[in-house]
Image: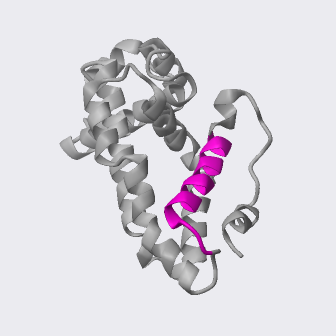
Amino acid sequence: MSPLNKQQLNRIRDDRKQQIKHAAMKIFARRGFTGTKTSMIALEAGISEGLIYRYFKSKDDLYSELVQELMDEAGKEFESIHLLPGTASEQIGTLTQGMLIESNKYAFMLILRARKEEEIPEKAKQALEQNSANELIDRLVPIFIKGQKAGEFPQGDAREMLSWFFYIINSLIMQDVWGEECGMPDVSFLMRILTK
């Protein structure tokens, strides 16, 4: 068996780091920052606890990196929603669908939980402040107003209606954490909350 080359080793390291981050996302989402121990992350990832520290200096660094990546990704999604094909309601529907799919569940749970926690690392706080929930909603207001002008959405305060809508979406995402499993409705059902 020949030794691994540098490219193969880098790929193995990248895969391992992703494995740790994926496991960490699940545990942080379910238990919060203070309720999570690196031993829990290691168990979820199926690795030794010490291996985490080969990739991250501390639990704080792991958490902060996750939050930063998720906020960067959310910012890009909200920023580019106007580029999606379709009407304003279809664009917001596509965004909503993306938030509710199973593969994104823990990412949104982690961010929602991080916004409510008092004790999180400073770097994570800064990442959350860079893309606050209000700023993300503000990026959708022009699309909603376009939909109001087209007769897709009712008249009224666009920001307020979007805030109510995403409060409902966030509550659905967090139902696992709260132990109130009522299932996930179809996006078309949810969009009827916003549309005429």
Q: Is residue 184 left or right of residue 2?
A: right
Q: Name, please, the residue furthest toward the front.
A: 156
* 117 shown above or below 91: above
Task: Pick whichever, 179 or 101, lies toward us.
Answer: 179
Q: Name, please, the residue furthest toward the bottom.
A: 150
Q: Is residue 14 left or right of residue 143?
A: left
Q: Name, please, the residue furthest toward the left.
A: 6
Residue 89: say if magenta. no
The quarter of the image holding the C terminus is bottom right
Question: What colouring does the structure picture have?
Answer: one colour
* 56 shown above or below 17: above
In the rendered image, residue 61, in percent from the top left (x then y), is placed at 28, 26
**Residue 99, quarter of picture:** bottom right
In the rendered image, residue 90, in percent from the top left (x then y), is placed at 60, 76
* 21 shown above or below 158: above
Residue 160: say if magenta. yes
Q: Residue at x 33, y 27 (%)?
A: 62
Q: Is residue 11 left or right of residue 160?
A: left
The quarter of the image holding the N terminus is top left
> Which range is magenta?
155-173
Most common SS among magenta residues:
helix
In the rendered image, residue 129, in percent from the top left (x then y), is placed at 31, 41
Q: Residue at x 76, y 32 (%)?
A: 180
Q: Is residue 104 left or right of residue 4?
A: right
Q: Residue at x 41, y 51 (%)?
A: 134
